[in-house]
DNA sequence: TCTCCTCGAGATCT
DNA sequence: CTCGAGGAGA
């Protein structure tokens, strides 16, 4: 089975969260944001070994069409400058040799990787496999107090000079400073990236955590002292629905059991032919003579209508 | 209790 | 793209 994602870039490398001393910083300038419609006009890269910059790569690339005024303004790269530059099929092999199989570092590095990947497929007929580290991703997880995580903003936060950027090699230097700044920040604050990105146990909605402050209940209400289970996507907030049941003197459960009295289905599930596992389980118990009623969300809403009004 | 989905929201790159 | 919320199923 083939999974369709990555816009078909199925051999794209992995997004890493490591602190490396050997890597290649990458930045490209293009005629626009879309790898399908737009073209690369400059590739910049810095090779770092043992934390030391050992080589630079900086090449202008002649596109098939003239670049727009907007891009000229943004990058300072004019059509004059590109007139005698080599085309991408000339530059890309050199770049590939430069990066070899090293890990790529960039800010929103997917942008650069995707352009390189697609051009590599077209020019060299092979994917761009390299793994990569995205300083944007690291920043979002690390510097949560920032309003945004644009390169400028992150630089300002880390006291990194980023004035007048938007040429490829220059942006590489800035991005390298950001990456090294992040590494330093991690050390100073004793933060492990692996821990920072570890999947955190989300505070799940547990039925038993829903309690009520009410002391007196309407003992004639349908839900009084009854066990209720919700399933499927609800129109109202699930927690609210559970709270109302609790306030009526009922009890909420996470799953259908032999004690369940009501199963409330989201409207979509109620009308669907496909029955969820909870639905099937409830029907099994009904056949066995258990007192379970299956309600749609609409019916549930009618039963608690007066509760919602106040 | 744990892992795997799906869905929607929010952002960044030129 | 990445993440979080919320569910399903084991």
Image (cartoon, coloured by chain):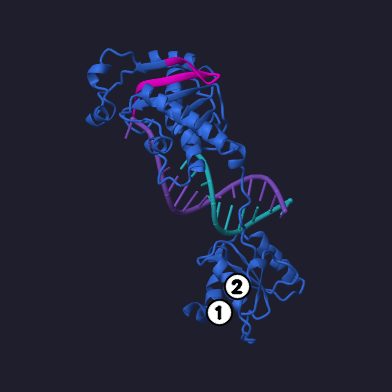
Chain colours: A blue, B purple, C cyan
| Residue A128 x %, y % | 50, 23
What is the spatial separation of the Cα atoms under label 2 and label 1, in whole angstroms? 10 Å
Q: Quadrant of the N terminus of chain A?
A: top right
- Tell me what residue is drawn at x 43 percent, y 35 percent: A158
Q: Say whether residue A249 is magenta.
A: no
Foreground tag (2 vs 1): 1
Towards the viewer: A169 or A309? A169
Residue A301 in view, yes or no? yes
- Residue for badge 2: A295
Q: Chain of mark 2?
A: A
Residue A206's place in the image compared with B1, above or below, is below
Q: Is residue A169 left or right of residue A191?
A: left
x%, y% of residue A52? 51, 18
Residue A21 badge: none
Identify which residue is drawn at 25% across, 27% down.
A72
Q: Residue furthest right?
A: A288
Q: Which chain hosts label 1?
A: A
Position of residue A225 measured from the top left corner of the image (x, y, whole percent): 68, 79
Q: Nearer the viewer, residue A86 or A145?
A: A145
Q: Which residues are magenta?
A: A37-56
Q: Is residue A197 visible?
A: no
Contact, CB < 8 Å: mark 2 with mark 1?
yes
Label number found at residue A303: 1
Q: Secondary structure at mark 2?
A: strand
């Amino acid at each position: 089975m083939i999974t369709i994602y990555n816009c078909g870039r199925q051999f794209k490398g992995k997004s890493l969260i490591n602190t490396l001393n050997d890597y290649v910083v990458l930045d490209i300038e293009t005629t626009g944001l879309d790898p399908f419609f737009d073209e690369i006009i400059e590739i910049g890269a810095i090779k770092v070994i043992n934390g030391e910059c050992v080589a630079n790569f900086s090449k202008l690339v002649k596109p098939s069409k003239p670049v727009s005024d907007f891009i000229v303004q943004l990058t300072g790269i004019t059509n004059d400058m590109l007139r005698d530059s080599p085309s991408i099929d000339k530059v890309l092999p050199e770049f590939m040799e430069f990066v070899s199989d090293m890990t790529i570092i960039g800010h929103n590095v997917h942008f650069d990787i995707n352009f390189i990947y697609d051009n590599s497929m077209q020019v060299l007929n092979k994917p761009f496999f390299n793994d990569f580290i995205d300083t944007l991703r690291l920043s979002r997880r690390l510097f949560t107090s920032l309003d945004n995580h644009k390169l400028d903003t992150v630089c300002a936060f880390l006291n990194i000079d980023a004035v007048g950027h938007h040429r490829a090699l220059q942006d590489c230097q800035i991005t390298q400073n950001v990456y090294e700044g992040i590494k330093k920040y991690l050390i100073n604050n004793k933060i492990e990236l692996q821990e920072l990105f570890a999947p955190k146990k989300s505070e799940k909605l547990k039925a038993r955590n829903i309690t009520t402050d009410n002391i007196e209940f309407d003992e004639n209400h349908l839900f009084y002292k009854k066990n209720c289970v919700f399933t499927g996507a609800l129109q109202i907030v699930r927690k609210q629905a559970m709270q109302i049941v609790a306030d009526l003197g009922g009890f909420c459960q996470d799953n259908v059991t032999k004690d369940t009295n009501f199963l409330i289905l989201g409207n979509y599930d109620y009308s669907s032919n496909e029955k969820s596992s909870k639905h099937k389980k409830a029907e099994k118990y009904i056949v066995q003579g258990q007192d379970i009623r299956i309600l749609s969300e609409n019916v549930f809403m009618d039963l608690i209508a007066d509760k919602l009004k106040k």
